[in-house]
Image (cartoon, grey):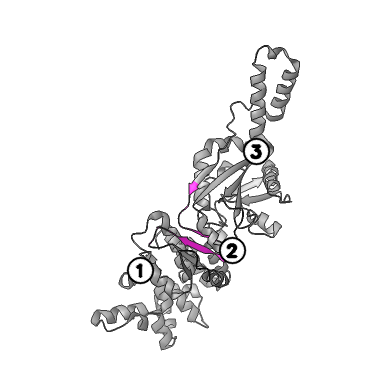
């Protein structure tokens, strides 16, 4: 991970929490029933999740009190539009963007001396079965301010109103109460410290609940895609819901996604793309056993690449170059079948969201595609960072260098 940090591909966009911010963060943890952390300095993402706190608590999802109850913490306006490193739902970052957009001034004011705990309310106390996920159509964010700053303002404003009523300005007891409030909390009259709940409509989404589930709506029929085979098997026996169920590795899923105009693949067009070249080189690395040169050098040098490519067996070379072979043969005769020449893994990996898919759904469909077939390291980094990190640490060191270079290269254009 140090290599990714040095390249600016991990740990960027985190907000440092130190000094009085630590105590405010701990106040929010206390609201969730979590013991204070001993750390004096740590970093948090846009949702308030911290890798250091997660390590101390030995819980990557300490901001979740059960799958149906997610929380966030805001201690600084610097968290605005920052990455969410451990999203439990695909809509988490959009939700935080909506919160900061609606209350940017109030957040700046409140975080001068307090913190904000967010409850991401799905309208469910808990999940009893995977189909409960179908009930999620709206998410409401409720706010709780540490130190009860909003309540303190209400009390101070009530005292001011009492002071201004009749001849109450003569009463010493009211003077004492106002002075005590001002000394304790300052002048709160102009402070923006009240946050009304915010509701956001939810359409298609991904959640890590039940081992990872995609809910796809607004298509021909509602679709649920499961990452966990165990959850899929337990759900498939339920026939009371009008929804199509698939495990991510089922071939029937691919056909359905194509038929519903959710994904598409053009092998002729794909052949000339950087994505296809990356997939070929990834498969090359998979098939090379021992090399005299570093993998990054082999993959970056045309002559070395051809040298090592020709050390592979005929079957391996045909697998890696199957798309070119198919395109060349199909141009001569339509008697050739794609499944006979193009490896199914490569075929799946070359799919992309259908051109008719709206922008708000495209990232979600890309995430589904890399879950189905994670052969392109750049796409995996963009759309499923947690899986990417898990893969990256087991790669050859030199191949890691090559991947980092490809990600930085494509990040400049933000085009796969």
**At numbered mark 1, what does the secondary structure look like: helix, strand or loop?**
helix
**At numbered mark 3, what does the secondary structure look like: helix, strand or loop?**
loop
Mark 2 or 3: in front is 3
- Judge whether 283 appears above or below 76 on screen: below
Q: What percent of the width, then of the height, locates residue 15?
A: 59, 48
Q: Residues within 10 Å of mark 1 (few under 14, many from 20)?
A: few
Span highlighted in magenta in the image: 200-219
State whether residue 243 appears in this view. yes
Mark 3 or 1: in front is 1
Q: Residues within 10 Å of mark 2 (few under 14, many from 20)?
A: few
- Judge whether 288 appears above or below 188 on screen: below
Q: What percent of the width, then of the height, locates residue 221?
A: 40, 63
- Quadrant location, the C terminus: bottom left
Q: Specify the label residue 46 is tagged with.
A: none
- Quadrant location, the N terminus: bottom right
**Relative to the observer, which residue lies in front, 406 or 183?**
183
**At numbered mark 2, what does the secondary structure look like: helix, strand or loop?**
loop
Determine which residue is flagged by label 1: 259
- Judge whether 139 appears above or below 207 on screen: above
Determine which residue is flagged by label 2: 1
């Amino acid at each position: 991970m140090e290599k990714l940090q040095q390249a600016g591909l991990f740990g960027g966009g985190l907000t440092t929490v130190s000094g009085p911010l630590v105590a405010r963060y701990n106040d929010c943890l206390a609201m969730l029933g979590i013991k204070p952390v001993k750390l004096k300095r740590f970093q948090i993402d846009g949702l308030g999740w911290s890798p250091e706190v997660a390590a101390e608590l030995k819980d990557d999802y300490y901001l979740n009190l059960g799958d149906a109850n997610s929380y966030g913490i805001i201690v600084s306006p610097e968290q605005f539009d920052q990455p969410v490193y451990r999203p439990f739902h695909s809509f988490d970052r959009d939700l935080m963007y909506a919160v900061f957009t609606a209350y940017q001034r109030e957040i700046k004011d409140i975080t001068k001396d307090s913190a904000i705990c967010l409850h991401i309310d799905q309208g469910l106390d808990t999940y009893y079965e995977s189909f409960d996920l179908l009930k999620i159509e709206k998410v409401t964010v409720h706010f709780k301010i540490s130190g009860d700053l909003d309540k303190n303002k209400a009390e101070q404003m009530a005292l001011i109103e009492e002071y201004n009523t009749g001849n109450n300005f003569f009463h010493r007891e009211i003077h004492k109460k106002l002075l005590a409030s001002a000394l304790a909390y300052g002048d709160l009259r102009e402070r923006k410290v009240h946050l009304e709940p915010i509701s956001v409509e939810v359409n298609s989404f991904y959640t890590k609940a039940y081992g990872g589930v995609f809910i796809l709506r607004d298509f021909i029929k509602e679709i649920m895609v499961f990452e966990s085979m165990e959850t899929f098997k337990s759900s498939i026996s339920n026939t009371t819901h009008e929804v199509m169920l698939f495990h991510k590795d089922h071939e029937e899923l691919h056909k359905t996604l194509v038929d519903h105009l959710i994904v598409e693949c053009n092998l002729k067009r794909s052949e000339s793309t950087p994505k296809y070249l990356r997939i070929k080189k990834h498969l090359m690395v998979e098939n090379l056993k021992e090399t005299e040169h570093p993998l990054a050098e082999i993959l970056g040098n045309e002559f070395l690449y051809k040298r090592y490519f020709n050390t592979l067996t005929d079957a391996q070379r045909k697998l890696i170059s199957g798309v070119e072979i198919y395109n060349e043969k199909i141009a001569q005769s339509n008697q050739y079948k794609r499944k006979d020449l193009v490896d199914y893994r490569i075929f799946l990996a070359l799919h992309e969201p259908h051109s008719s898919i709206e922008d708000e759904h495209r990232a979600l469909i890309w995430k589904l595609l890399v879950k189905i077939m994670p052969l392109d390291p750049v796409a995996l980094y963009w759309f499923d960072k947690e899986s990417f990190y898990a893969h990256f640490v087991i790669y050859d060191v030199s191949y890691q260098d090559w991947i980092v270079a490809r990600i930085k290269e494509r990040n400049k254009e933000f085009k796969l």
